[in-house]
Image: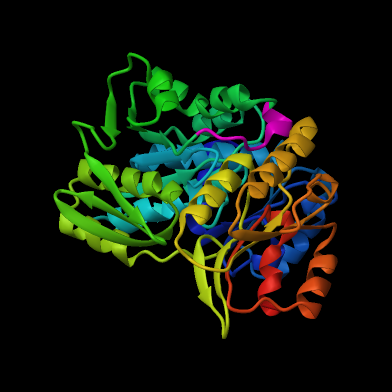
């Protein structure tokens, strides 16, 4: 089937789905394959649940005219997404980075929504399947679309750019994330900069942090840029405070956010710079930033009967972990306690990176810490203020027997640790 023929069927459908558990009547279902499943076997189930058409790539499953046979379902999904993107010509802002992608995406959306109809990646659907689904969710009346891109290997960002064909782009930062796939921090910089490479090749616009030396180096002599920073001529934005929420100054006006940690300053700053570029009135920008409240275990403040908890347990890598710790140590709260979970996908660097965190904690006299996981349990410390546990079950058992009271607690760890479970005990 040609892409034009498939696109006509797509236009007859209400949405695109790849999961029969989330299918709605009128959907176009793509029977994707995974390591442990074959979507083709769910084709009839999808029709029973109300899908209008199902796209399959194994001919033995074609039993009706509602079964659309293609050579490869995943490639068909990706090609359809690019075709849709070209038809609509909606301006697309792409973003990637080691930390803060989803928060930055949501901030940009909040700012631009003050003036435009905005479509954006839902959650963190930012891979080779999520990006096509994001593009296919763009409606004809959408003014601007925001596409988040994630990667843990080289060439993945380049591949996603070829699908989304962005008009604008930004990289939040370069940090020690997915070292197992990228090999080193230098590998991270090279991989994330594939977005810049694509934008440069096609003479598109880059938003970048002028205070970040690595960003400046990656931009080089490319001049189709919009810079922001403390001393930027394009968009001057100054950090004011983070006690605990980030405050900044823009257009001689203070903006008080609901985001915690100095590390969120740059995420807010780029949203402001993009808002300015797209001519969102600065008072509307201020309203958007001040009205944005994080969710999904990202920089959430939770008050219990006896504790105040900073929940930042959505994900973690050495760079984001250290940024969170440095911010936490500088907060003027008493009785500060850390509950930290393992950082994943670090490969051969895992033990060294976890030991580096523990060594940092040993120097903090006013903080007690509980570190949890296979990697943290193998670290060495002589500090009585650091308790290393191997599993979440060990943590739960400890918290049940030794309740934390009257503490200011930071909870942070990789997604696989799911440390937010501790809230039920705390």
Q: Quadrant of residue 116?
A: bottom left
What x and y, as percent, mark residue 339? 67, 61
What x and y, as percent, mark residue 40? 79, 51
Quarter of the N terminus within the rendering: top right
For the point 29% across and 36% down, which residue is it?
229
Asked whether residue 120 appears in the rendered view, the answer is no
Q: Quadrant of residue 247?
A: bottom left
What x and y, as percent, mark residue 175? 56, 35
- Name the side, left or right, on which 345 lies relative to 41: left
Q: Quadrant of residue 412?
A: bottom right
- In this rendering, is residue 54 above or below 97? below
What x and y, as percent, mark residue 359? 69, 42
Q: Range of the magenta residues?
A: 174-182
Asked whether 416 falls inside the magenta stretch, the response is: no
- Name the side, left or right, on which 194 lies relative to 242: right
**Nearest the camera: 265 or 191?**
265
For the point 34% across and 43% down, which residue is it?
270
For the point 25% across and 43% down, which residue is it?
237
- In this rendering, is residue 329 above or below 126? below
- Name the side, left or right, on which 415 lies relative to 321: right
**Nearest the camera: 423 or 106?**
423
Asked whether residue 39 appears in the rendered view, the answer is yes
């Amino acid at each position: 089937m040609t892409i034009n023929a498939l696109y006509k069927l797509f236009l007859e459908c209400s949405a695109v789905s790849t999961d029969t558990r989330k299918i709605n009547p009128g959907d176009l279902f793509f029977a994707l394959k995974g390591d442990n499943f074959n979507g083709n076997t769910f084709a009839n189930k999808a029709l029973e649940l109300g899908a209008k058409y199902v796209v399959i790539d194994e001919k033995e499953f074609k039993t009706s005219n509602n079964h659309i046979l293609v050579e490869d379902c995943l490639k068909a999904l990706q090609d359809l997404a690019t075709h849709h993107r070209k038809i609509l010509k909606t301006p697309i802002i792409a973003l990637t980075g080691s930390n803060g992608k989803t928060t930055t995406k949501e901030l940009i959306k909040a700012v631009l929504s003050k003036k435009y109809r905005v479509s954006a990646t839902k959650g963190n659907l930012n891979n080779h399947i999520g990006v096509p689904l994001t593009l296919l969710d763009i409606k004809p009346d959408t003014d601007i679309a925001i596409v988040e891109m994630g990667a843990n290997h080289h060439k993945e960002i380049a591949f996603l750019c070829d699908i989304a064909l962005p008009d604008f782009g930004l990289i939040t930062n370069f940090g020690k994330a997915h070292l197992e796939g990228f090999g080193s921090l230098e590998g991270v910089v090279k991989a994330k900069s594939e977005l810049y490479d694509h934008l440069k090749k096609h003479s598109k616009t880059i938003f970048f942090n002028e205070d970040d030396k690595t960003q400046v180096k990656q931009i080089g002599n490319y001049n189709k840029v919009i810079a922001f920073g403390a001393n930027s001529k394009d968009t001057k934005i100054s950090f004011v405070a983070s006690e605990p929420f980030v405050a900044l100054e823009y257009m001689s006006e203070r903006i008080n956010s609901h985001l915690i940690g100095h590390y969120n300053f740059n995420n807010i700053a780029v949203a402001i710079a993009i808002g300015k570029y797209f001519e969102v009135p600065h008072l509307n920008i201020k309203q958007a930033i001040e009205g944005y409240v994080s969710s999904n275990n990202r920089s959430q403040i939770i008050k219990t009967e006896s504790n105040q908890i900073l929940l930042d347990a959505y994900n973690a890598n050495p760079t984001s972990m250290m940024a969170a710790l440095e911010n936490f140590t500088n907060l003027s709260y008493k009785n500060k306690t850390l509950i930290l979970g393992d950082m994943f996908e670090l490969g051969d660097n895992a033990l060294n990176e976890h030991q580096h965190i523990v060594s940092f904690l040993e120097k903090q006299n006013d903080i007690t810490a509980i570190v949890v996981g296979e990697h943290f349990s193998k670290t060495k410390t002589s500090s009585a203020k650091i308790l290393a546990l191997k599993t979440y079950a060990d943590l739960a058992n400890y918290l049940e027997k030794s309740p934390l009271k009257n503490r200011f607690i930071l909870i942070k760890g990789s997604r696989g640790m799911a440390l937010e479970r501790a809230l039920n005990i705390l």
